[in-house]
Image (spheres, helix red, strand yellow):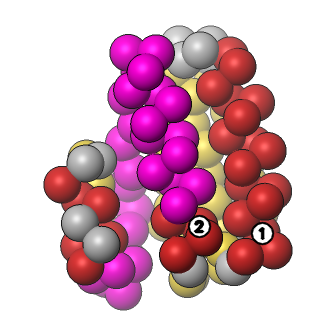
């Protein structure tokens, strides 16, 4: 998995490429914790390069969403491929977070 973080203090873009399995989910958690400390108003998770995600990766996304919500921030996801979008719908992540398909 490749993680790139860009943007300003108010708006941060996180681009993910590759696969998120349990081993990579810990790296994702460290990145999300760093972002939360900066206190952005909005985080955009660009996953157009993401091939697959497991429940541990989804859990880290929910963690980020909840932490941002507590600080009056928002999380948006863009670039979900068809398979990942179906997974997000099954676990009802699309009911919590604004998700745009690829």
Q: In which quarter of the image is the C terminus?
A: bottom left
Tell me if I can see residue 44 in this picture: no
Say which label, 2 or 1, has the lower sequence index. Answer: 1
Q: Does the magenta stretch include residue 67?
A: yes
Tell me if I can see residue 11 in this picture: yes
- Looking at this rendering, what residue extends furthest in the left direction? 95
Q: Is residue 7 above or below residue 96?
A: above
Mark drawn on residue 98: none
Q: Give the range drawn in magenta.
A: 59-87
Residue that appears at 66% across and 68% down: 17
Residue that appears at 18% across and 54% down: 95
* Residue 72 position by quadrant: top left
Which is more toward the observer, 13 or 23?
Answer: 23
Which is more toward the observer, 102 or 91?
Answer: 91
Q: Quadrant of the N terminus?
A: bottom right
Query: Mark 1 and mark 2 in contact (Cβ < 8 Å)?
Result: yes
From the image, tell me which residue sits under label 2.
57
From the image, tell me which residue sits under label 1.
24
* Residue 94 position by quadrant: bottom left
Q: Disc 2 on helix, strand or loop?
A: helix
User: Residue 93 appears at what percent x and percent y?
Assistant: 30, 60
* Residue 7 position by quadrant: top right
Q: Does the magenta stretch include residue 50?
A: no
Residue that appears at 50% across and 65% down: 58
Query: How many numbered discs sit on the rendered protein?
Result: 2
Would residue 71 be found to the left or right of residue 92 on screen?
right
Number of other residues with Cα within 10 Å of mark 2, as a class: few under 14, some 14 to 19, many 20 or more: many
């Amino acid at each position: 998995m490749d993680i790139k973080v860009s943007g300003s203090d108010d708006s941060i873009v996180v681009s993910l490429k590759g696969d998120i399995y349990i081993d990579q989910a810990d790296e994702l958690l460290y990145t999300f914790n760093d972002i939360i400390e900066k206190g952005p108003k909005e985080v955009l998770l660009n996953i157009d390069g993401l091939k697959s995600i497991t429940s541990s990766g989804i859990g880290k996304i929910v963690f980020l969403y909840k932490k941002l919500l507590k600080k009056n921030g928002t999380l948006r996801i863009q670039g979900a491929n068809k398979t990942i979008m179906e997974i997000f719908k099954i676990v009802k992540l699309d009911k919590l977070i604004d998700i745009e398909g690829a």
